[in-house]
Image: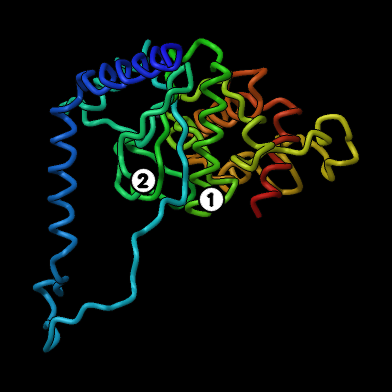
Amino acid sequence: MQRLATPLVLLVLSATIASCVKNPYAATNRFYKQQARDFTRSLQTMPAAPDSVPAGRYSVGTTNFNLRKPNYVIIHHTAQHSVDETLKTFTLPRSQVSAHYVIGRDGQTYHMLNDYLRAWHGGVARWGNVTDVNSCSIGIELDNDGTEPFAEAQITSLLRVLSSLKRAYNIPAANFIGHGDIAPTRKNDPSALFPWPKLAERGFGLWYDAAVLTDTTAAPFALDSLGGVGPGITPREALRIIGYDTRDLPAAVSAFKRHFASAESGTELTEQDRRILFNLYRKCL
Ligand SMILES: [Zn+2]
């Protein structure tokens, strides 16, 4: 009896202590709940036609609807030195930045915003014809200073978050991309150390067929003197079809190389880069 009682007492004590730990974010959590209540109220009002058109005779709401779902996942590194630093930044109204998820080096994951709400993580960005990336995406920030390898526990948690998002919202593999991909002139995250191939193996993100690097017959084109990546296909066209904003071509090439050919950086496409680019382009047609 005595032997059983001691662990029980310890358990009760530790539970009591845990429940007494003060949440340093209690005040900003109240702010979050108030914001969510305000949005709820505005969603509950019946929609009305714009003033510029004659309204119908009745107010009629449809019976058939649900919430819009995110269709992209944008991965970032924080370029900061700790999760605490990032949590503070994302709970400071004047910073005007946020993300849905923040994942620490130890794998601890903070879900900071309901997936159905719009986080401010993409900034001015573009992918294909999508010009408001924040409105259709989930933002995930990885605690990483931008020069270090990504911790294993962190990637394990990331893969679990991605699985649950993919399952919940049916997000296509090609729509898991990086911040540097959608804002090539401004951003370089996640860094070239990010393990995209590991993600692609599990269906998160596009990847090329390894055979194109070694098997020259697998690439049905001659690298032409005009610098094309395939018959009549310029690098700009191939990058554009994949989704890159090519208005600044060197920036788009650099973003592509960071994501898909991390052994090399810069704004020049090597023969290997061209093979990879053409292979990915064909997957996106
Ligand atoms: Zn970012």
Q: CA distance from mark 1 to mark 2?
A: 13 Å
Q: Please tell me which residue is depicted at 69% across the width and 49% down the height of the picture.
A: 283
- Residue 76's spot in the image, x, y percent? 44, 28
Colour basis? rainbow
Q: Position of residue 59 (x, y in %)?
A: 14, 81
- Front-lying residue, 10 or 132: 10
Q: Residue at x 36, y 34 (%)?
A: 111
Question: Which quarter shows the N terminus?
Answer: top left
Where is 79 relative to 261, above or below?
above
Q: Quadrant of the C terminus?
A: bottom right
Look at label 2 and name its amino acid: Asp
From this view, report whether residue 274 is shown above or below residue 234.
above
Residue that mark 2 sits on: 115
Residue 187 seen: no
* The quarter of the displayed image where residue 236 is located: top right
The residue furthest left is 51
Residue that appears at 58% across and 25% down: 258
Amino acid type of the residue that numbered disc 1 sits on in the rendered structure:
Arg
* Local SS, label 1: helix
User: Do tag 1 and tag 2 residues touch (Cβ < 8 Å)?
Assistant: no
Read off the residue under disc 1: 167
Is 144 placed above or below 112 here?
A: above
The image shows residue 197 at horizontal and vertical percentages of 67, 30
Horizontally, is 271 left or right of 53 in the view?
right
**Res 159 → quadrant:** top right
